[in-house]
Image (cartoon, rainbow, N blue to C red):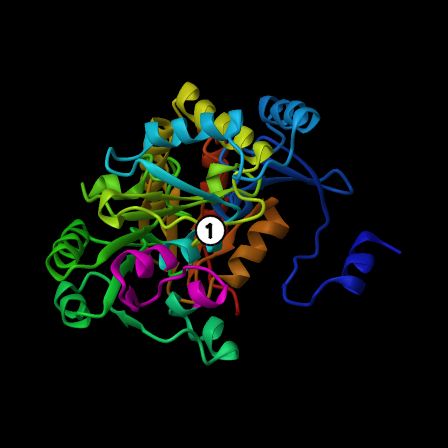
Amino acid sequence: MSFQELEARYTSGFYNKKDITITYGEGCYLYDEQENRYLDLIAGIAVCSLGHAHPHLAGVIAEQAKRLISCSEIFYNDQRAQLLEELNSITAPSLNRFFLCNSGTEAMEACLKIARLSTKKTDFVACNMCFHGRSMGALSATHKKDYRDPFLPLVPGFTHVPMNNAEKLEEAVTGQTAAILIEPIQGEGGMRLADAEFLQAARRIADEKGCLLIFDEVQCGMGRTGRWWAQEWSGVTPDLMAMAKGLGSGFPVGAVAIGEKAGEMTKGAHGTTFGGNPLACAVATTVIRTIKHRGLVQQAEENGEYLMERLRAIDSPLIREVRGKGLMIGVELKQKVGPYIQKMFEEHRILMLNAGATVIRIVPPLIIKREQLDYAVEALGQVLSQPVEA
């Protein structure tokens, strides 16, 4: 029985799987069981910021696993303390406390609970096309009907408004609103950017109406856009910020940065068994320090500008728009992207992902080189040279 047959027999059934069995990775490449090499422009969905099998990161994991893996936050811990210091060094001065958890969804759940705890209010306003996670609270904040409808009724009190429409946002915020939730760049929603003016208006509205402002930087944070956090492009600082994905470069770790406006946290009101464990903390500390040491934030900005310029130069009537920041880019087509992603896989051994039906999502490891970007652009240009049937 093959690995695919074995996995198909016992897997949950929730996932659409490609006809490929990945067995190992190196840098920006993944390999299947026949040793075929694939250029990875998915990076675990913007997760593997340092690429695959990073030797120093692997060494840190091995060494820490020999020392201590689990240590609840009922005790202090050396690795946790170092991670908290590193997080403080890359976030806005007012975001100087951190709740450690295991994923982006858990980070968003914590944001929702902290907002209700701090404001004593119940409701939330989020944006159309947003994605905040799949647990019941985060799913209630998420907009897409396909994700929501099978699980109705969800947590009450969530309203959605068009992104970049400050007037609609102000109308939706009431005296019962605990927080406004925004992704500075929507990933799942089509790689759409929140305007600086919209984020500035959200900050003003939150302050005037006595609610918190939450930014979901799970996908667009950790240097991906050419800044540590996508919010930096607008100069707006939230009261709570969710982070995960690239923070662990493939290892499960998430966090919430907590601002002054959120007030003091009530002891015992929230917690987690595995969040802040020494192994995860050692990994995340190493990821932050490596990104700093290698200048990967600046590199993401420079390579992103280069990649955007090359993508916009592709001569194809299929392309509607190229948009994004840094190495978080969407290529929107005038038809469904599935067949073109499949052709990139079959004909060029390049792994890509969609962001909605008509957008190709490009979120490679931050370590990607320009020759690899060139190869991908040339291949995409060939694939988009003529329409294929959906």
Tell me what residue is drawn at x 38 percent, y 61 percent: 189
Query: How packed is label 1: few (under 14 Cα within 10 Å), some, or many (20 or more)?
Result: many
Is residue 106 left or right of 121 when viewed as pictured?
right
The residue at the point 82 percent across, 59 percent down is: 5
Q: Residue furthest top?
A: 293
Tell me if residue 357 can be seen: no
Q: Which residue is mark 1?
A: 104
Above or below, comparing residue 266 to residue 144 in the picture: above
Magenta-drawn segment: 113-139
In the image, 97 versus 168, the foreground residue is: 97
Look at 37% across and 42% down and name the residue there.
221
Q: Nearer the viewer, residue 187 or 133?
A: 133
Residue 316 in the image, given as x and y percentages of width and height: 38, 54
Q: Taking 142 as reference, is 237 above or below it? A: above
Residue 141: where, in percent of width, then height? Answer: 37, 66
Determine whether, in the image, residue 285 is placed left or right of residue 262.
right
The stretch drawn in magenta includes residue 304:
no
Residue 137 falls inside the magenta stretch: yes
Q: Secondary structure at mark 1?
A: helix
Residue lying farthest to the right in this orientation: 1
Left or right, 361 with reference to 231: right
In the rendered image, residue 309, in percent from the top left (x then y), is placed at 31, 40
Q: Quadrant of residue 300?
A: top left
The x, y position of residue 214, in whole percent, is: 29, 53
Which residue type carries mark 1?
Answer: Gly
